[in-house]
Amino acid sequence: MPRGRRGPQTSGSLSPHQASYVLNRMMSERRISPGEINRYLSDINREINDLEQKLSSLRAASGAVRAAATGSGGAAAAGAAPAKAGGGAKRRAKITPEQLASRQLQGRYLGLIRQIPANKRGQYQRTAKEKGREAAIKEMQESLKK
Protein backbone atom coordinates (compact mmCIF):
# COMPACT_ATOMS: atom_id res chain seq x y z
CA MET A 1 0.00 0.00 0.00
CA PRO A 2 1.53 3.37 -0.98
CA ARG A 3 2.37 5.83 1.74
CA GLY A 4 1.12 9.38 1.76
CA ARG A 5 3.48 12.33 1.52
CA ARG A 6 5.16 13.56 4.62
CA GLY A 7 5.23 17.18 5.57
CA PRO A 8 3.08 20.03 4.34
CA GLN A 9 1.82 19.82 0.81
CA THR A 10 1.84 22.92 -1.34
CA SER A 11 -0.46 23.22 -4.28
CA GLY A 12 1.38 26.22 -5.70
CA SER A 13 -0.48 28.87 -3.72
CA LEU A 14 0.77 30.14 -0.40
CA SER A 15 -0.96 32.11 2.28
CA PRO A 16 0.47 35.61 2.84
CA HIS A 17 2.15 34.39 6.04
CA GLN A 18 3.69 31.40 4.27
CA ALA A 19 4.95 33.60 1.43
CA SER A 20 6.52 36.01 3.91
CA TYR A 21 8.20 33.14 5.75
CA VAL A 22 9.57 31.65 2.52
CA LEU A 23 10.93 35.03 1.35
CA ASN A 24 12.58 35.69 4.72
CA ARG A 25 14.07 32.22 4.74
CA MET A 26 15.40 32.58 1.17
CA MET A 27 16.92 35.96 2.04
CA SER A 28 18.59 34.55 5.17
CA GLU A 29 20.02 31.66 3.13
CA ARG A 30 21.18 34.18 0.48
CA ARG A 31 19.17 32.49 -2.25
CA ILE A 32 17.41 35.74 -3.10
CA SER A 33 18.32 39.34 -2.37
CA PRO A 34 16.08 42.22 -1.36
CA GLY A 35 17.08 43.87 -4.65
CA GLU A 36 15.65 40.96 -6.63
CA ILE A 37 12.41 41.14 -4.67
CA ASN A 38 12.17 44.87 -5.40
CA ARG A 39 12.85 44.20 -9.10
CA TYR A 40 9.99 41.69 -9.21
CA LEU A 41 7.70 44.16 -7.47
CA SER A 42 8.61 46.93 -9.90
CA ASP A 43 7.88 44.57 -12.80
CA ILE A 44 4.23 44.37 -11.73
CA ASN A 45 3.41 47.81 -13.12
CA ARG A 46 5.34 47.17 -16.31
CA GLU A 47 3.49 43.90 -16.84
CA ILE A 48 0.13 45.56 -16.17
CA ASN A 49 0.96 48.25 -18.74
CA ASP A 50 2.02 45.63 -21.29
CA LEU A 51 -1.23 43.71 -20.78
CA GLU A 52 -3.31 46.89 -21.11
CA GLN A 53 -1.53 47.76 -24.36
CA LYS A 54 -2.12 44.27 -25.70
CA LEU A 55 -5.80 44.41 -24.76
CA SER A 56 -6.08 47.79 -26.44
CA SER A 57 -4.52 46.54 -29.66
CA LEU A 58 -6.74 43.43 -29.61
CA ARG A 59 -9.84 45.57 -29.17
CA ALA A 60 -8.75 47.78 -32.05
CA ALA A 61 -8.07 44.74 -34.23
CA SER A 62 -11.44 43.19 -33.46
CA GLY A 63 -13.26 46.37 -34.38
CA ALA A 64 -15.31 46.15 -31.21
CA VAL A 65 -15.99 49.40 -29.42
CA ARG A 66 -16.80 48.49 -25.86
CA ALA A 67 -15.87 51.77 -24.21
CA ALA A 68 -19.10 53.41 -25.36
CA ALA A 69 -21.22 50.57 -23.99
CA THR A 70 -19.44 50.21 -20.64
CA GLY A 71 -18.55 53.80 -19.84
CA SER A 72 -15.26 55.58 -20.00
CA GLY A 73 -13.60 54.36 -16.82
CA GLY A 74 -13.54 51.80 -14.07
CA ALA A 75 -12.95 48.07 -14.28
CA ALA A 76 -14.90 47.70 -17.50
CA ALA A 77 -12.44 49.92 -19.34
CA ALA A 78 -9.56 47.82 -17.98
CA GLY A 79 -10.94 44.70 -19.64
CA ALA A 80 -13.34 43.29 -17.07
CA ALA A 81 -16.70 42.21 -18.38
CA PRO A 82 -19.59 44.30 -17.10
CA ALA A 83 -21.95 42.59 -14.68
CA LYS A 84 -25.34 41.68 -16.08
CA ALA A 85 -28.38 42.41 -13.97
CA GLY A 86 -30.38 39.41 -15.18
CA GLY A 87 -27.42 37.04 -15.27
CA GLY A 88 -28.39 36.03 -18.80
CA ALA A 89 -26.06 35.00 -21.57
CA LYS A 90 -23.96 37.68 -23.21
CA ARG A 91 -25.20 38.60 -26.69
CA ARG A 92 -22.75 38.00 -29.49
CA ALA A 93 -22.29 40.48 -32.28
CA LYS A 94 -23.62 39.20 -35.59
CA ILE A 95 -20.96 38.34 -38.11
CA THR A 96 -21.13 39.19 -41.76
CA PRO A 97 -21.38 36.51 -44.45
CA GLU A 98 -17.79 37.38 -45.45
CA GLN A 99 -16.58 36.78 -41.89
CA LEU A 100 -18.44 33.47 -41.74
CA ALA A 101 -16.93 32.33 -45.04
CA SER A 102 -13.46 33.35 -43.88
CA ARG A 103 -13.86 31.45 -40.61
CA GLN A 104 -15.10 28.35 -42.40
CA LEU A 105 -12.18 28.53 -44.82
CA GLN A 106 -9.77 28.96 -41.92
CA GLY A 107 -11.31 25.92 -40.21
CA ARG A 108 -10.80 23.80 -43.32
CA TYR A 109 -7.21 25.08 -43.62
CA LEU A 110 -6.42 24.29 -39.98
CA GLY A 111 -8.07 20.88 -40.18
CA LEU A 112 -5.85 19.95 -43.10
CA ILE A 113 -2.60 21.55 -41.90
CA ARG A 114 -2.77 19.49 -38.70
CA GLN A 115 -2.64 16.34 -40.80
CA ILE A 116 0.55 17.48 -42.57
CA PRO A 117 3.86 16.52 -40.92
CA ALA A 118 5.46 19.48 -39.14
CA ASN A 119 8.51 19.52 -41.40
CA LYS A 120 6.32 19.98 -44.50
CA ARG A 121 3.88 22.59 -43.19
CA GLY A 122 6.07 25.54 -44.18
CA GLN A 123 5.48 25.09 -47.90
CA TYR A 124 1.70 25.17 -47.40
CA GLN A 125 1.94 28.17 -45.09
CA ARG A 126 3.92 30.02 -47.77
CA THR A 127 1.32 29.07 -50.37
CA ALA A 128 -1.46 30.36 -48.10
CA LYS A 129 0.41 33.64 -47.65
CA GLU A 130 1.31 34.14 -51.30
CA LYS A 131 -1.61 32.58 -53.22
CA GLY A 132 -4.32 32.40 -50.58
CA ARG A 133 -5.79 29.78 -48.29
CA GLU A 134 -7.89 28.27 -51.07
CA ALA A 135 -4.78 27.36 -53.07
CA ALA A 136 -3.10 25.95 -49.96
CA ILE A 137 -6.19 23.86 -49.19
CA LYS A 138 -6.20 22.43 -52.71
CA GLU A 139 -2.51 21.52 -52.45
CA MET A 140 -3.00 19.89 -49.07
CA GLN A 141 -6.02 17.94 -50.27
CA GLU A 142 -4.02 16.66 -53.25
CA SER A 143 -1.08 15.65 -51.07
CA LEU A 144 -3.39 13.93 -48.59
CA LYS A 145 -5.47 12.48 -51.47
CA LYS A 146 -8.76 13.75 -50.09
Image (spheres, helix red, strand yellow):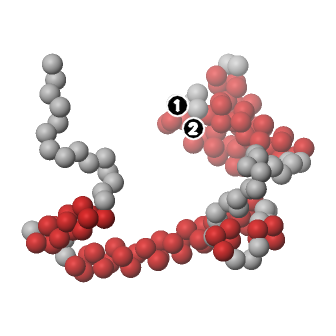
Of the 4 image quadrants, the one containing the N terminus is top left
| Viewer-nearest residue: 101 or 68 | 68
Q: Disc 1 on helix, strand or loop?
A: loop
Q: Is residue 104 above or below residue 45?
A: above
Q: Residue at x 66, y 74 (%)?
A: 74
Query: Residue farthest to the left?
Result: 29
The residue located at (43%, 73%) in the rendering is: 44
Q: Position of residue 22 (x, y in %)?
A: 20, 63
Q: Are marks 2 and 1 in contact (CB under 8 Å)?
A: yes
| Residue 70 horizontal side relative to residue 113, left or right | right
- Which residue carries the number 2 mark? 121
The residue at 14%/27% (across/down) is 3
Residue type at mark 2?
Arg
* SS for callout 2: helix
Furthest residue in direction right, as rendered? 97
Residue 126, given in percent of the width and then of the height, sits at 64, 46
Q: Which residue is mark 1?
A: 117
